[in-house]
Image (tube, rainbow, N blue to C red):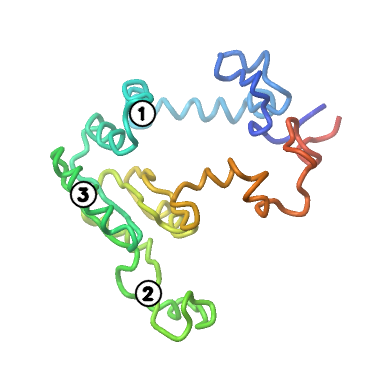
Amino acid sequence: MNYIDPACAYCPSTVRACRAGDAEVKGPGFCPSKVDPDTQAAARALYDDPETCRVALVAGRVEAEGYCKWTRVEEVVQFAKKMGFHKIGIANCISFVDHAYVLSGILESHGFEVVSVACKNGSIPKEAIGLRDDEKIRPGGFEALCNPVAQAELLNAHGCEFNVVMGLCIGHDSLFFKYANGLSTVLVAKDRVLGHNPVAALHLADSYYGRLWGPDKPPKPPKLPVAGRRGGS
């Protein structure tokens, strides 16, 4: 059977051959090493860029030193220190100002300069980009547009070398990453329903959150690729 797309999500727990270094031999037919080794090779060559290689090296060292010991906040601090960064940006949801205050203090206590910008900066009315009143959270009143483009540009303009995203909405975070110049990481992924722990929905997808599934839900979670994930035989 010939597969046309990588499908690592379907790799059986008993395989995961890439982790053992023998993906080319033991990887399933949908393994990237089987489906698209040319793109893998091209990506591997990008690590020859000195800065890309340095980021990967530091990330690997932080992973090893703090493995199952450091919180993500500690990992942010240690990564930034090992990278030699001096100025860190915080792009936070307006609802996370209190948390951003604590994070800013932690970072400053380690000697970093910190710039923080909340999502509602600029006070742009949502109508300014064409959102109708009935499309707002609370129609009939002023609602400021989330402004991730300005968050990114402000952090760029003020020399931030590394950015920490805290609770930006889906899509708004995407725009932030699009316009940010510095490396960026996510400290908090917003999920208002699950206390900002979005992975809980996946843990409970076959019980409390069964509504997540669309009309083509398989009888049971598939262990092999479903129809449409492969090419001709």
What numbered label is drawn on residue 155?
none
Which three-letter amino acid code belongs to the residue tagged 1?
Answer: Ala
Which residue carries the number 3 mark?
Answer: 104
Which residue carries the number 1 mark?
Answer: 59
In the image, what residue occupies the spot 45% across and 30% down?
46
Q: Earlier in the sequence, mark 1 or mark 2?
A: 1
Mark 3 crowd level (few <14, some 14–19, many ≥20, 10 Å Cα): some
Q: Secondary structure at mark 3?
A: helix
Which three-letter amino acid code belongs to the residue tagged 2?
Answer: Ala
In the image, what residue occupies the spot 26% across and 57% down?
98
In the image, what residue occupies the spot 21% across and 49% down?
104
Mark 3 or 1: the one toward you: 3
In the image, what residue occupies the spot 36% across and 21% down?
64
Q: Secondary structure at mark 2?
A: loop
Mark 2 touches mark 3? (CB < 8 Å)? no
Which three-letter amino acid code belongs to the residue tagged 3?
Answer: Ser
112 in relation to 90, above or below: above
**Left or right: 208 as drawn, with respect to 161:** right
Is 171 or 179 nearer to us in this picture?
171
56 in relation to 195, above or below: above
